[in-house]
Amino acid sequence: MSWPRRILLVLAGVALTHVATIWALPRIIVRVVQHRLARGVGINQIHHAPLPDAEWRTVVMPSPDLLYSACAYDASDRPVLITAELPDGYWSVSAFANNTDNFFVQNDRTASNHRVRVVFSAQPHFHDAVGGTVVQVPSKTGIILFRQLVLDRRDLPKAQAIQRAATCAPL
Amino acid sequence: MYERAATATHALFVLNRSETLYYRAHTDDAGGDLDARCDYEIRGRPLDARWWSITAYGGDDFLIPNREKRYSFNMANLAQEPDGSFLIRASAGPQPGDWLPLGRSGHVSFAVRLYVPSAEISAHPERAALPSITGRCP
């Protein structure tokens, strides 16, 4: 093989590797978070974290004003149901596909009921008999994240009680 | 694809912009890199959102260890001047007023979060009246 052709092959290999790495990086990071959650509480189970401080090393750029709960969902076999009670202040539940895309978010003002019920399904046209919001997931696995604002540390016990009332489980 | 990779690395699980807008500052208004050895004044006015906060991060994008366990200020705990403006002093050593400790973290950054921004800001994030950052370095 001639030298120019060898150089072209090497350059093409480098470019392909670069593109593959950039494509794979978000998926690998989500996979790492999923494995951490699975190791801690299991898949389709909710993990309630304390208010972030300098010891927090789970996910970069945590907000120290938010209580986070997370669930590594897997809707391969059955839909996944999340439920939660709404606090008086800001609250949201959001869902991220296995490539980190944010495909769903609902906050305390956009939720239709004080008691939130959302079903994440891999099947199109799934109907929830109890009337919850149904979301078709773009990837069978991903992350569901709950955020609850705590403006005053004196409100933390009440906020944590609401945080712990949230659930994530196979339907 | 590059944006998604960068987000996954430096700001994982950010919400869409109708729910939250995130602004990061790695330099002050004069263009100097933010550094924990410098003293900074962050001046601004209340931002157009349901709630907002300003947080300091270390070079590793995590919260900066400090004795006071103070990592951010938000619209509820920030002292406002009679004209509605606010001033945050960010530095390694203690400062009067609203002080944001920078510890010994070397490179630092500030993040402004706007949760449920106004429709105008959500549509035009560049119109947010972000605070100014002026630095004084040794």
Image (cartoon, coloured by chain):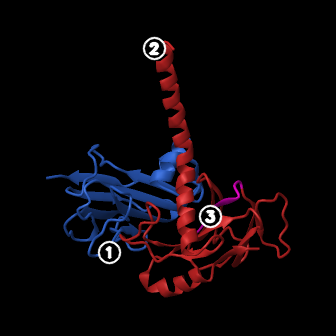
Using a 10 Å C-alpha cutoff, classify the residue at mark 1 as few (fewer than 14 neighbours), some (14 to 19) or many (20 or more). Answer: some
- When asked about the image quadrant of residue A131, the answer is bottom right
Residue B11 point in image, percent of width and height: 47, 55
Q: Amino acid at mark 2?
A: Trp
Decide if residue B42 is on the left or right side of residue A88: left
Q: Tag 3's secondary structure?
A: strand
Residues marked 1 and 2 touching at CB (< 8 Å) = no
Residue under numbered circle 2: A3
Numbered tag placed on residue B69 in the rendering? 1
Report the chain holding disc 2: A
- When asked about the image quadrant of residue A76, the answer is bottom right
| Residue positioned 35% across, 61% down in the render | B56
Q: Amino acid at mark 3?
A: Ser
| Residue positioned 29% across, 43% down in the render | B31
Query: In which quadrant will I find the N terminus of chain B?
Result: top right
Residue A64 point in image, percent of width and height: 42, 70
Q: Which chain is red?
A: A
Can residue B20 be seen?
no
Report the chain holding disc 3: A
Q: Amino acid at mark 1?
A: Lys
Residue under numbered circle 3: A94
- When asked about the image quadrant of residue B92, the answer is bottom left
Numbered tag placed on residue A152 in the rendering? none
Q: Viewer-nearest of labels 1 and 2? A: 2
Marks 3 and 2, Cα distance to the nearest angstrom? Answer: 53 Å
| Residue positioned 30% across, 69% down in the render | B65
Q: Of the residues under marks 3 and 2, which one precedes in the sequence?
A: 2
Q: Viewer-nearest of labels 3 and 2? A: 2
Using a 10 Å C-alpha cutoff, classify the residue at mark 2 as few (fewer than 14 neighbours), some (14 to 19) or many (20 or more). Answer: few
In magenta, the rendered stretch is A138-147
